[in-house]
Amino acid sequence: MENKDPEEEVEVYERKPRLLYVMQFLVFIGLAFMGAYLFHMIAVAVLKPFTEYPFVPDQLEFFRDSSNIRYFWIYQGIVSIGTFGFPCLVFPLYHRERPLEYLGIKERPSLKIIGFAILLILLSQPLVTWIAVQNSSFSLPPGMEEIQEQLDRLHHSMTELQKLVTSGTGPLDLLMTLLVMAVIPAILEELFFRKAMLRILYDISRNSHVSIVLSSLLFALVHGEIYYFMPLFAMGLMLGYLALFSGNIWIPIVAHFINNALAVVQMKMLQRYPDTELLREEYQFPLVFILLSALCVIGLMWLIKRHSNSIEDGKGLD
């Protein structure tokens, strides 16, 4: 890649005011809402001959019948494609670029960096778990007890729903769970948050770190779980810096897949071995493990940055 004079880059930005990129961001978010609605309608049309889902009065009761779980996977998969995939395919047309080139899908990742990224996710688990445990004690200020109760009920319902839709025991159930909870989110959410959105936010802020923080906040908010907000935010930061340092979207995609696949395996094992303390969400690792995990995250990020060619500010976000 040809080196550019920094002054030339500043001149390019001066020709394109930040307001233009803010408008692009709003268009991108609008496409996400449009995609979510359109593909919701498609999913409803696909499922209508077989079931009333998602228009059922009690989803928890509905999914207690394991034969209904497949409808959840079909609906969730289609809506995810619309929410995160649709805007990533349509938005590049605004730039008159081919979607695959704009998203960097054709670029080959380094096997060495992939290995570092997988190690990063595996060794970060004690730290992320500790953050999740701290987040679970979240409570609103006095006087907001009613809102707190509503958040608690929502959290309980979502947790129970997650247990039900992952309760299948056959090989096909495991494959479907991995597809919808690991493969599809890893690919589409990374293209959405760590490629398209991160690029737009960098154009607005002109600072890699600010754009990564903002995209991580949005990543955590979109998942809609207040009791998992901080671990989701931390994961968003790690994935954002993987995208920045590696300059290749496949690196955070692989890392995201490994993280979600680990969560699926953990849920499956907990269902089979419910008395195993290590598998529980509230399990607290010893402090030394948490500190070592934090050091490993810092060390592996340094290695990834050192062995990559995209360490200039913003270069890895192109």
Image: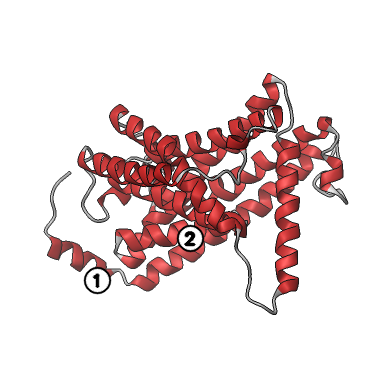
Taking the image as drawn, is residue 86 in sight? yes
Amino acid at circle 2:
Leu
> Does 180 sit left or right of 106 as displayed?
right
Return the mark for residue 217: 2
State the SS at label 2: helix
Return the mark for residue 224: none
Pick whichever, 239 or 135, lies toward us: 135
Pick whichever, 82 or 164, lies toward us: 164
Return the mark for residue 14: 1
Q: Tell me the residue at 17%/43% (across/down).
A: 1
Q: Tell me the residue at 88%/51% (across/down).
A: 57
The percent position of residue 231, horizontal first and vertical second, equals 51, 52
Q: Quadrant of residue 226?
A: bottom right
Pick whichever, 205 or 146, lies toward us: 146
Q: Quadrant of residue 252?
A: top left
Q: Residues within 10 Å of mark 1 (few under 14, many from 20)?
A: few
Taking the image as drawn, is residue 31 in sight? no
Q: Tell me the residue at 75%/66% (across/down).
A: 149
Asked whether disc 2 touches disc 1, contact meaning CB atoms under 8 Å apart, the reply is: no
Q: Disc 2 or disc 1, which is closer to the eye?
A: 2
The percent position of residue 13, horizontal first and vertical second, equals 25, 67
The percent position of residue 310, horizontal first and vertical second, equals 24, 45
- Whole-number angstrom distance, CA of label 2 to CA of label 1: 28 Å
